[in-house]
Image (cartoon, coloured by chain):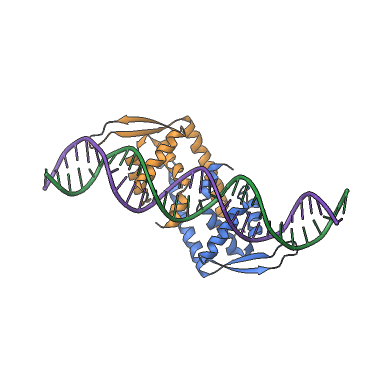
Chain colours: A orange, B blue, C green, D purple
Amino acid sequence: MGKQMTEMLKGTLEGIVLAILSGRPAYGYEITTRLREMGFSDVAEGTVYALLVRIEQKGLVGVEKHPSEKGPPRKVYSLNAQGRADLEEFWRTWSFLTGRLEQLQQGGN
Amino acid sequence: MGKQMTEMLKGTLEGIVLAILSGRPAYGYEITTRLREMGFSDVAEGTVYALLVRIEQKGLVGVEKHPSEKGPPRKVYSLNAQGRADLEEFWRTWSFLTGRLEQLQQGGN
DNA sequence: CCCGCTACTCCGTGATACTATGTACCGGTA
DNA sequence: TACCGGTACATAGTATCACGGAGTAGCGGG
């Protein structure tokens, strides 16, 4: 995708990852793969790892190390209470935004 | 609104302004006011002016100076062909994103 | 023995919004 | 007159976030 998508993902990607984690715990490489499968084909790996560090430092997730059969140990992230609260707040902000945009798209300005 | 909104607006605000201009030409101060009325209560004035300079330099809009009865002359921006194309591209990117997010919100992950 | 996949990390860059501040024009009011 | 508030635009500095690119490391297969 283009530059527009890159900019639009700012602030949204974090919510997307939180939403993914709300389903079940996951580790970085897995999350990157899932994002790619979803169609976010050029989300950079480094971006995802940096984001995970960020939400960990914000205290939105817990981390556990699990050995992998195929490489270095995985850092499995799981949403905690604060993370769930943050996700809800994200959805509120998101729906506010979609509401306004929908209005704009229908020529409602 | 909070910091989440600030981050989410990155990349979106430009589309929003283009959408506003697609209705009819407008000048900076007016756009800021309209954004506030829409609920984007803390979009900074400086942000809007910087954005307008940006889209002008990208060649998405035309500019005309009109005198004002109440202050300095207004710089009235109007969408040109390239701006309309950019706006359409914005809507495509936006609907891609909303599609994925909708899926995620319905626990579809 | 190297290649490719898995898995994580880090540094520098670019884009964007915010804060804060400044300039300037105008009308109303004390 | 002097000042204030609303109109209107501009800019310098800061923070955040995604990307590009490179590096480290474990593991299994040709």
Q: How many labels does the image show?
A: 0
Taking depth in this image into account, of D7 and A17 the one nearest to the observer is D7
Provide residue B106's location: percent of width, then percent of height.
45, 42
Provide residue B36's location: percent of width, then percent of height.
64, 51
Q: In which quarter of the image is the N terminus of chain B?
A: top right
* Residue A20 in view of the camera: no
When asked about the image quadrant of residue A3, the answer is: bottom left
* Residue A83 in view of the camera: yes
Taking depth in this image into account, of A86 and C29 the one nearest to the observer is C29
Q: Which residue is drawn at 32% across and 41% down?
A: A29
Judge whether B95 appears above or below A62 on screen. below
Provide residue A55's location: percent of width, then percent of height.
44, 37
When asked about the image quadrant of residue D10, the answer is: bottom right
Q: In which quarter of the image is the C terminus of chain B?
A: top left
Q: In this view, does B4 lie to the left or right of A74?
A: right
When asked about the image quadrant of residue C10, the answer is: top left
Q: Which residue is drawn at 53% across and 62% down?
A: B55
